[in-house]
Image (tube, rainbow, N blue to C red):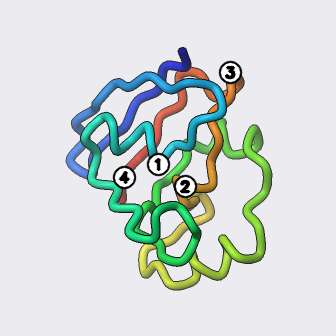
Amino acid sequence: MIALTFQSPSGSTTHAEAQPGETLLRVGQRAGQPLEGTCGGQMACATCHVLIEPSYRDLLPPASAEEEDMLDLVPDATRSSRLACQIVMTEQLANMVVRLP
């Protein structure tokens, strides 16, 4: 299991555990986080927008052109923005903090 923490805009935290190979979207949904994933993880929306802690950004593969296009539609996107449906959990991401915008 891979431990991680979701942080709400108000600062409250929820601890969760992921299986290797599981998407961050599924982990967040199982943990009761407000990650809609309206498109079912097909990268056709941005309802699973999250902010990745800077120290973990470089551990992730770069966002694809399609993901970047979706993030361009998010009004509060930052350099730390990613779509949770595109992040596959690995042991390297243990103890990551994921902020919800």
Distance from the alpha carbon under mark 2 to that under mark 1: 5 Å
In terms of sequence position, does the residue under pointer 1 or pointer 3 come before the other?
Answer: 1
Distance from the alpha carbon under mark 1 to that under mark 3: 16 Å
Answer above or below: position of 48 versus 14. Answer: below
- Residue 12 versus residue 86: which sits nearer the camera? 86
Q: Is residue 90 left or right of residue 33?
A: right
Q: Which residue is mark 4?
A: 100
In terms of sequence position, does the residue under pointer 1 or pointer 4 come before the other?
Answer: 1
In terms of sequence position, does the residue under pointer 3 or pointer 4 come before the other?
Answer: 3
In terms of sequence position, does the residue under pointer 2 or pointer 3 come before the other?
Answer: 2
Residue 88 - label: none
Residue 62 rendering spot, x and y as whole percentages: 78, 57
- Identify the residue shown where x is 49% and y is 19%: 3
Quarter occupied by residue 12: top left
* Disc 2 versus disc 3: nearer the observer: 2
Which residue type does callout 1 highlight? Leu
Quarter occupied by residue 13: top left
Q: Which residue is mark 3?
A: 91
Q: Which residue is mark 2?
A: 85
Distance from the alpha carbon under mark 1 to that under mark 4: 12 Å
- Identify the residue shown where x is 37% and y is 37%: 6
| The N terminus sits in image quarter | top right
Give the SS element for disc 3. helix
Q: Which residue is mark 1?
A: 25
Callout 2 environment at 10 Å: few (<14), some (14 to 19), or many (20+)?
many
Quarter occupied by residue 65: bottom right
- Identify the residue shown where x is 56% and y is 43%: 23
Distance from the alpha carbon under mark 3 to that under mark 4: 21 Å
